[in-house]
Amino acid sequence: MPAAHESIVILGGGQAAAWAAKTLRTEGYGGALSMVSEETHAPYERPALSKGVLGGTVAPESIQVFRPDVLASLDLDLRQGVRALAVDRAARRVSLSDGTSVCYDKLLICTGGKASRPRVDGIDLPGVFTLRTIDDCRDIGAALATARRVCVIGGGWIGLEVASTAIGLGKDVVLLERGSRLCQRVLPETVAEQLLALHRKSGVQVRLATVAERIERMSGRLQVRTAEGEAVDADLVVVGVGLVPNDELAAQA
């Protein structure tokens, strides 16, 4: 293990970062240990966001990777709400968005990924969401509280789980998937067909081979126009079309 006087910096505040910190301490590392996280929440597990947390049956605090006392026992210099801007390998220093910097002997990059935002006109309109963080989940939940109709773009796991949660909350849901079947990249056709039947039975209006071309705001509501000529009215739109790795720092370093 590294010597006690060494300093290790972990970039990222998700599950990988949290478990890396705990493993270092468990294996006997006693030196300085810093974690830099753009989020303001303690490290948490993401799978429940699109299900129990969004549906209001699971408290956000319950999905934390470690209990507060366990996290405190790791003796971390936990820097939250700040983003790592650049890595100076020669000086072994990371510049942060709050104007400070942190020095390291060893650096572990666990920056994860961000929700993909397709090149669709209107993707940045108010009422159009992606789901990746607790804050995203809270924003979508607040919009769902007053919504009657939801349009979900994307027929992968996130899109299907959001659609299912919205149906469970009594909303009218239309799901647009550009592929010829659901979860096309990860499921065989027979399983995808069963998944399609299950969601349609629950009330989700699934449109396969349908491409969202642009999103407009009309008379206080959103309208998703497709390449196939359909116009889908909605009170909110959730885009779930995959993940983009946060690899900029790693590439730069």
Image: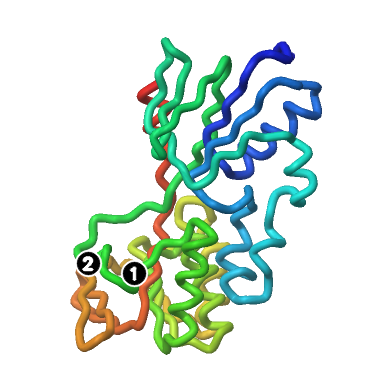
Which of the 4 image quadrants contains residue 179? bottom left
Cα gap from disc 2 to disc 1, whole angstroms: 8 Å
| Quarter of the rendering occupied by the N terminus | top right
The residue under the point 74% across, 48% down is 66
Residue 33 vs residue 236, the one in the foreground: 33
Question: In the drawing, does residue 152 fall left or right of residue 11?
Answer: left
The residue under the point 51% across, 66% down is 137
In this figure, which residue is indicated by the disc labeled 2?
A: 122
Q: What element carries label 2?
A: loop
Please rate how many residues cluster around mark 2, counting C-alpha atoms within 10 Å: few if below 14, some from 14 to 19, many from 20: some
Q: Identify which amino acid the numbered label 1 is placed on.
A: Val
The residue under the point 53% across, 89% down is 170
Percent across and percent down for residue 190 are 55, 62
Q: Identify which amino acid the numbered label 2 is placed on.
A: Gly
Question: In the drawing, does residue 22 fall left or right of residue 193?
Answer: right
- Note whether 190 is above or below 233 in the view shown: above
- Note whether 88 is above or below 238 in the view shown: above
- Note whether 11 is above or below 6 in the view shown: below
Question: In the drawing, does residue 175 fall left or right of residue 26?
Answer: left
CB atoms of marks 2 and 1 within 8 Å: yes
Question: In the drawing, does residue 245 fall left or right of residue 68?
Answer: left
Q: Earlier in the sequence, mark 2 or mark 1?
A: 2
Percent across and percent down for residue 201 are 55, 83
Q: Which colour scheme is used?
A: rainbow
The residue under the point 63% across, 43% down is 15
Residue 64 vs residue 100, the one in the foreground: 100
- Note whether 203 is above or below 138 in the view shown: below
Please rate how many residues cluster around mark 1, counting C-alpha atoms within 10 Å: few if below 14, some from 14 to 19, many from 20: some
In this figure, which residue is indicated by the disc labeled 1?
A: 128
